[in-house]
Image (spheres, rainbow, N blue to C red):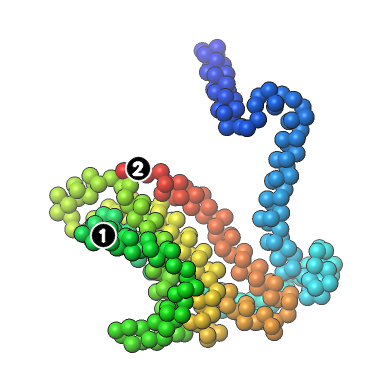
Amino acid sequence: MTFVTTTVRAIGKQKAAEESEDRSNVSALDRSRRSVRLTTRILAVVLIACLVVVSFGPLLWLFKAALSTSQDILKYPFEWWPSGIQWQNLPDAWSQIRIGQYLLNTVWMAAGCWFFGLLVALTGGYGISILKPRYAKVVNAGVLATLFIPGVVSLISLYVTILDVPLIGVNLVNTYWAVWLPTAASAFNVLLVARFFDRLPRDVFEAARIDGAGVFRVFWSIVLPMSRPVIGVVSLLTIVGSWKEFLWPLLVLPSPDLQPLSVGLYRVSDTAPTSLLMAGMFISVIIPIALFLMFQRQFLRSAGQAGAIKG
């Protein structure tokens, strides 16, 4: 039994080595040379170091600046706390430049964008992919065509529409509806959900219809439970997109009491001390990063499942 186990392990190692050779651009003969192995390791270390610097360098500098005095930030930008760590910058930024209020506004704005964006994406994808009316191809082509229109081109027309919404004649400026509704109409999310729904098994829907399930019942009881992977992906994309949005909230939310972090920090940049401004920026950046690190396993699993389901 021990001999069989050892043989199986040896065969597995051999197959893994063969697969590794197939995936590598360096042959086994070249890897046997010491100079080639040393050069490959050095290149790998340099590449990883460059990626770390590019990815974490700005965040580490922002962390250093957030806990420094204004004089140290301007006079010694690349030295580690010449005057000591200023932990008081974080609570001061929270209270003095209203980071707490801006953060609450950002969370509320992101929550509305997530809800309405998910509602439009799921119902739009359900109609295009599963209900498939006669004009489904026309709608799909129209939605796809909007992806080729730059957002800046439609900025003025969208703002005019927000000033006087057709049919109801309401001005949405200084309300979160002015941010929620345009963000919800995401052609990319609709097409992403529709492509995911295309891979769902049609036999389940046919069986449900035979059992008497209506359109809403199929959507609520069958489609939504099977759509958790794509819901996770769309949710993260929508929340991150709304969190870092700047230009549109700047236009439609002129009141400081409604502005999110991105706009609020820009508004106080001319008057707030540099140290408190850096602390506020660090708070605004670290929160979405922390949320992603907390839920990265669920997101990556959902992203993989969203592309792995076959019809």
Residue 219 in view, yes or no: no
Counting from the top left corner in percent of width and height, residue 40 is at 72, 35
The residue lying at 40 percent from left, 69 percent from top is 184
The residue lying at 80 percent from left, 64 percent from top is 78
CB within 8 Å, label 2 to label 1:
no
Q: Secondary structure at mark 2?
A: loop
Counting from the top left corner in percent of width and height, residue 213 is at 18, 55
Give amino acid for label 1: Ala
Q: Secondary structure at mark 1?
A: helix
- Label 2 belongs to which residue? 310
The residue lying at 34 percent from left, 55 percent from top is 194
Q: Residues within 10 Å of mark 1 (few under 14, many from 20)?
A: some
Q: Is residue 160 above or below residue 292?
A: below
Q: Is residue 219 left or right of residue 71?
A: left
Label 2 or label 1, whichever lies nearer to me, is: 1
Picture quadrant where residue 14 is located = top right
Nearer to the camera, 92 or 275? 275
Picture quadrant where residue 263 is located = bottom right
Q: Is residue 160 above or below residue 33?
A: below
Picture quadrant where residue 139 is located = bottom left
Q: CA distance from mark 2 to mark 1?
A: 22 Å
The residue lying at 47 percent from left, 73 percent from top is 153
Counting from the top left corner in percent of width and height, residue 177 is at 41, 78
Residue 43 in view, yes or no: yes
Give amino acid for label 2: Lys
Earlier-in-chain disc, 2 versus 1 = 1
- Label 1 belongs to which residue? 136
